[in-house]
Amino acid sequence: MDTLSYKTPSLRKEDVQRDWYVVDATGKKVGRLCSQIATMLRGKHKASYTPHVDNGDNIIVINAEKVSFSGDKWNSKEYLRYSGYTGGLKRRTAQEMLDKKPEAIIEKSVKGMLPKNRLGRAMFKKLFVYVGAEHPHEAQNPKPLNI
């Protein structure tokens, strides 16, 4: 039996190279946009992807209030929270979320697509969502990302 002389490289957290990307959410469908963002946060778009290492990039999302849903989801889609008390279920439609906290639509969607462990929580910290076209990360020289 022939032994291979090479190994699949496994990335270490010390060797991670992170880039900054800015995404304009104007007119984008929420699900398609957020699945691409989650892939970038995990680092699955890189050849050096390693499942147990957070090697994803930093993502800045601007114009979060201008996303779109297909169909009648603005009125039918509900976001649920539970306070922990009896009868403490709180409901908000997507339209109410857009009126009160538009960045939460993208944040909740992306968070649901990341792993549910400490690695997923570390990946989520690299997502920055802003209402409007301004963001405070100009010093990082983010590259535009077309999704």
Image (cartoon, rainbow, N blue to C red):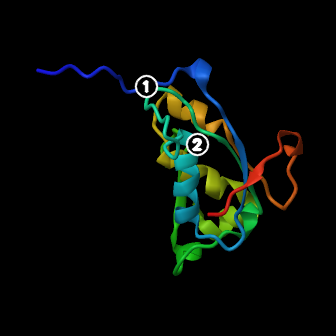
Residue type pointed to by label 2: Leu
Residue 37, position as x, y percentages in the image: 59, 52
The answer to whether marks 2 and 1 mark residues whose Cβ atoms lie closer than 8 Å is no
Provide residue 78's location: percent of width, then percent of height: 53, 63
Q: Is residue 72 left or right of residue 6?
A: right
Residue sitting farthest toward the left = 1
Judging depth in this view, the residue of 51 and 8 nearest the camera is 8
- Quote the CA–CA distance across marks 2 and 1: 20 Å
**Label 2 crowd bin: few (<14), some (14–19), many (20+), radius 10 Å:** many
Q: Circle 2 sits on which residue?
A: 41
Residue that label 1 marks: 9
Q: Position of residue 106 (x, y in %)?
A: 63, 56
Confirm whether residue 36 shows in the render.
yes
Amino acid found under the numbered disc labelled 1:
Pro
Quadrant where the image shows the N terminus: top left
**Residue at position x 83%, y 40% from top?**
140
Question: Which of the pair 130/40 is nearer the observer?
Answer: 40
Question: What residue appears at the point 84 percent right and 43 percent down from the top-left corner?
Answer: 137
| Quarter-of-image position of residue 33 | bottom right
Residue 95 versus residue 30: which sits nearer the camera?
Answer: 30
Name the one closer to the observer, 45 or 70: 45
Query: Residue at left 52%, top 42%?
Result: 46
